[in-house]
Amino acid sequence: MTILAPCIWPLLPIVFSASSGSGKQRSLGLTLGVMLSFTIFTLFISYIVKIFPIDPNSLRFVATLIIGLLGLSMLIPPLGAQFEVLINNLLGPLVLKPDTRSRSQSRFKKEGSGLGAGLITGFSLGLVWAPCAGPILATIATLSATQSVNIRVFAITLAYVLGLGIPLYIFSSFSAELFGKMRAVNKYTGRIQQVFGLVMVIMAVLIYTNYAQVLQARVLDLFPGYSRFLSQFEKNSRLQKELDKLGPQAGHSQLFAGRWAQTINEDDQNLLSKGGLAPEFPGNGQWHNTAPLSLQALHGHVVLADFWTYSCINCLRTLPHLTAWYEHYKKDGLVIIGVHTPEFVFERDAQNVSNAIKQFNITYPVIQDNDYMIWSAYQNHYWPAEYLIDAKGHIRRIHFGEGGYDHMEEAIRLLLKESGQAIEGDLSVIKDQTPRYDRSPETYLGTHRMQRFVSPEMITMSDQVFTLPAEIPLDHFAFQGIWNVQAQYAKSGPGAALEFKFKAGKVFLVAGPAHAGDRIKVLMDGKPMADIILDDHRLYDIIDLKGAVEVHTLRLQFLDEGTSIYAFTFG
């Protein structure tokens, strides 16, 4: 069905034009080139960028440049002849044995150059083509972005590109056959091929400037049901059930089995239970507020390891309790270690973490777990998560999420008494700000964990135009204007806006500007509320209804291009 999708329309003129050259050899090369580059850069781009610090957009620029040059070679015959010589010189030694090269040269000149030109064109098309991401491709892209590619994901990707390649080859071969018949009856086929070359040059310019996306959106405005039909084609429960098997399995490992399970229960009848030895803090993450620490060096202390990240509103609401406990009990031997495991890329920056530590008055030690080594050692799955460790190094209590602060403090006091400390006084008096009412769920705006997205267009992971649906259901959102949606974030383009129908008392947005001072205009139910001025990548307060919990439609208008938005959370 991908061959019928709107996102492939800008490529069809190029396919048709490029196929008018050397018959079915070029069609085969073009198809194989698209399949090869799509497979490589869909599955392995995160690995490639990690090994070679290159900008993926530079690859796109090179690809459009190659397409434009191929068009020029068709438009200007002498240039085309030189291009054919270049292809012969490049591919001839690779595909012809020395003893057969001389007698095969004439055949290769006729067929091999067509195959080679097709391969180069197809490989370039695979770089600039961002296919419409239905559930299958979104899952593949997500697992690739998180470097979770395995043999099953690789096999599904090959099946996907084969499903694309078959109709693409048929279309390309039809174009070549049609041009071949035209050549037999029309003396102006040379001129026609020059026109095709001009089409390739124009399409390369349109793709590079993203104007092809604008034209695509205008066509979809005339036929809105078409895109919606294609986007719904893959959305069925059986498919989703199979896709869920591809990613890392949810749930807890054997680390949480047996006696440890008692510490996870929310009834809190047993404040403490005996778990295994806590894992040491692996890795060489940067420490804040202290020199590097180890659990071995902290033997005899009660340790509370708190997994958090500074743009997580749930984590931020726990910080007043943690800082209060540390100030109250550190003299008695309590050590709190904040394990900062980033949820988004910008949270890996040490200066950003340092600024957040100062902003939230965190005085206890914090270690950056950018490589998820501590997260993995504890087999953790949540932000926030607390692991309470006794003076002998055993995990005695685990708590996930917000709330339960009085029970955790009571458990801390019991373990300090076990270690020989005389604990007196009352529990800390800090208001529990955990929301107790029904509200809209946390909503991610990148393809990695995107849910409840209702714009009719399928996401291409490149600059594209989105439109609003006729109606937005509760807890759903839609894009409008030009957006570039990637695995972790969506980046605003010209005329970008977003609408979200929410139920909450407060709305928060994780966002970052292209330049400090970029603005977002906030409207609620069509009425202007405020302009948010962005200074950094962090959590922003968007709406505060002063204690009321209501249903409203939020509209954000992005007054500057390049603003990155990551997630909504609600209070």
Image (tube, helix red, strand yellow):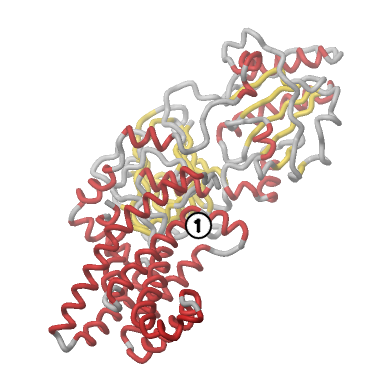
Residue 184: horizontal and vertical position, in percent? 16, 83
Residue 63: horizontal and vertical position, in percent? 44, 70
Q: Nearer the viewer, residue 102 or 477?
A: 102
Residue 346: horizontal and vertical position, in percent? 59, 50
Q: Is residue 209 visible?
A: no
Residue 80: horizontal and vertical position, in percent? 36, 86
Q: Is residue 326 above or below residue 112?
A: above
Residue 281, picture quadrant:
top right
Residue 289, picture quadrant:
top right
Q: Is residue 568 above or below residue 252?
A: below
Q: Nearer the viewer, residue 551 or 236?
A: 236
Q: Amino acid at mark 1?
A: Asp
Q: Residues within 10 Å of mark 1 (few under 14, many from 20)?
A: many
Residue situated furthest bottom in the rendering = 78
Q: Nearer the viewer, residue 312 or 433?
A: 312
Residue under the image location 28 percent in, 71 percent down: 24
Residue under the image location 16 percent in, 80 percent down: 182
Q: Is residue 289 left or right of residue 251?
A: right
Q: Nearer the viewer, residue 18 or 138?
A: 18
Q: Which residue is mark 1?
A: 518
Task: Assign a secondary structure to mark 1.
Answer: loop
Q: Is residue 78 above or below residue 176?
A: below
Residue situated furthest left in the rendering = 185
Residue 523, picture quadrant:
top left
Q: Is residue 178 left or right of residue 359?
A: left
Residue under the image location 29 percent in, 63 percent down: 169
